[in-house]
Image (tube, rainbow, N blue to C red):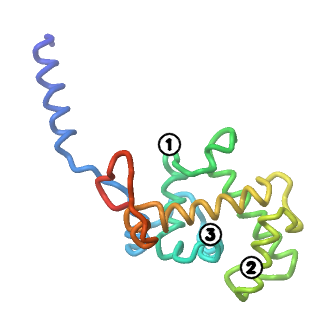
C-alpha cells in the first residue's frame, strides 16, 4: 500500500464520518421511549426519580434516571460528582449511596421514599442534606454529597438546556450554542 492510497482511503473515511449525523442523547426522549437502563437497577431508578423529583420538580419527567444511567455508562461521565476528587468509575459511588439511602429508609421503618407524604419526604431530605440521617453506611459517600448528587443531576436535566432557561424566563447565553435543545 502506498501513501497515495492511504490518503484516499483516509480522506473517504473522514468524509463519511463528518457527513454522518451527530446523535445526541435526550433523557426526556429516552424516558418517553422506555429505553432500557444499562447501569441502574429498577429499584435505583425508582429511588432516583422520586428523590430527584422531590428536590427539583419535573426531574422525573425530564428523564433524570436516564440521564444518570447514560452518563454512568459513558467512559467520560459529565456528572457533577466527577469534580468531587473521587477515584475510579462513578457508578459504584451512585450504587453505594443509593443502597445506603435505601437501608436508612428501611431501618427507620419508612418504606420506600416514593410512598412518603411530601412533608415526610422533606424531613428525610433535610436529614440527608445536613448529614443527620441515620443509619448511613460509612463506605458510601457522605449524605450531604449524596444530596448534592441528586439535586445537581435533577437541576441539570430540568434547567440545563435552552428550554430550561426559557421556562425560567432567562436568556440562554452559552459560549457555543448547542446543536440540539438538550
On screen, residue 15 versus residue 30, left or right, reads left
Front residue of this view, candidates 146 and 87: 146
Query: Within 10 angstroms of label 2, few (less than 14), some, or many (20 or more) residues?
Result: some
| Image height of 55 relative to 22, above or below | below
Callout 3: helix, strand or loop? Answer: helix
Front residue of this view, candidates 1 and 162: 162
| Image height of 165 relative to 74, above or below | below
Whichever of labels 1 and 2 marks the residue nearer the N terminus, that label is: 1
On screen, residue 115 versus residue 168, left or right, reads right
Mark in front: 1 vs 2? 2
Q: Quadrant of residue 116?
A: bottom right
Residue topped by disc 2? 122
Quarter holding the N terminus is: top left
Callout 2: helix, strand or loop? Answer: helix
Which mark, by number, is residue 48? 3
Pick out the residue farthest to the bottom: 117
Callout 1: helix, strand or loop? Answer: loop
**Residue 149 pos. (x, y %):** 65, 58
Mark in front: 2 vs 3? 2
Q: CA distance from mark 1 to mark 2?
A: 34 Å
Front residue of this view, candidates 136 and 152: 152
Residue topped by disc 1? 75
Query: Within 10 angstroms of label 3, few (less than 14), some, or many (20 or more) residues?
Result: many
On screen, residue 86 versus residue 24, left or right, reads right
Whichever of labels 1 and 3 marks the residue nearer the N terminus, that label is: 3
Whichever of labels 2 and 3 marks the residue nearer the N terminus, that label is: 3
- Determine the residue positioned at 78% across, 63% down: 100
- Determine the residue positioned at 66% across, 56% down: 94
- Determine the residue positioned at 38% across, 60% down: 182
Q: Quadrant of residue 40?
A: bottom right
- Determine the residue positioned at 65% across, 73% down: 51
Amino acid at each position: 500500500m502506498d501513501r497515495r492510497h492511504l490518503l484516499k482511503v483516509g480522506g473517504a473515511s473522514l468524509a463519511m464520518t463528518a457527513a454522518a449525523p451527530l446523535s445526541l442523547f435526550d433523557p426526556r426522549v429516552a424516558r418517553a421511549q422506555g429505553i432500557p437502563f444499562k447501569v441502574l437497577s429498577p429499584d435505583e431508578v425508582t429511588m432516583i426519580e422520586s428523590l430527584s423529583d422531590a428536590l427539583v420538580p419535573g426531574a422525573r419527567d425530564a428523564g433524570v434516571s436516564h440521564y444518570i444511567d447514560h452518563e454512568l455508562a459513558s467512559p467520560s461521565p459529565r456528572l457533577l460528582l466527577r469534580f468531587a476528587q473521587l477515584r475510579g468509575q462513578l457508578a459504584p459511588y451512585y450504587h453505594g449511596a443509593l443502597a445506603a439511602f435505601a437501608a436508612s429508609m428501611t431501618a427507620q421503618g419508612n418504606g420506600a421514599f416514593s410512598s412518603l407524604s411530601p412533608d415526610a419526604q422533606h424531613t428525610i431530605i433535610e436529614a440527608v442534606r445536613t448529614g443527620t440521617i441515620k443509619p448511613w453506611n460509612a463506605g458510601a459517600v457522605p449524605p450531604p454529597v449524596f444530596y448534592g448528587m441528586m439535586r445537581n443531576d435533577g437541576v441539570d436535566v430540568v434547567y440545563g438546556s435552552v428550554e430550561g432557561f426559557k421556562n425560567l424566563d432567562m436568556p440562554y447565553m452559552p459560549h457555543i450554542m448547542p446543536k440540539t435543545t438538550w
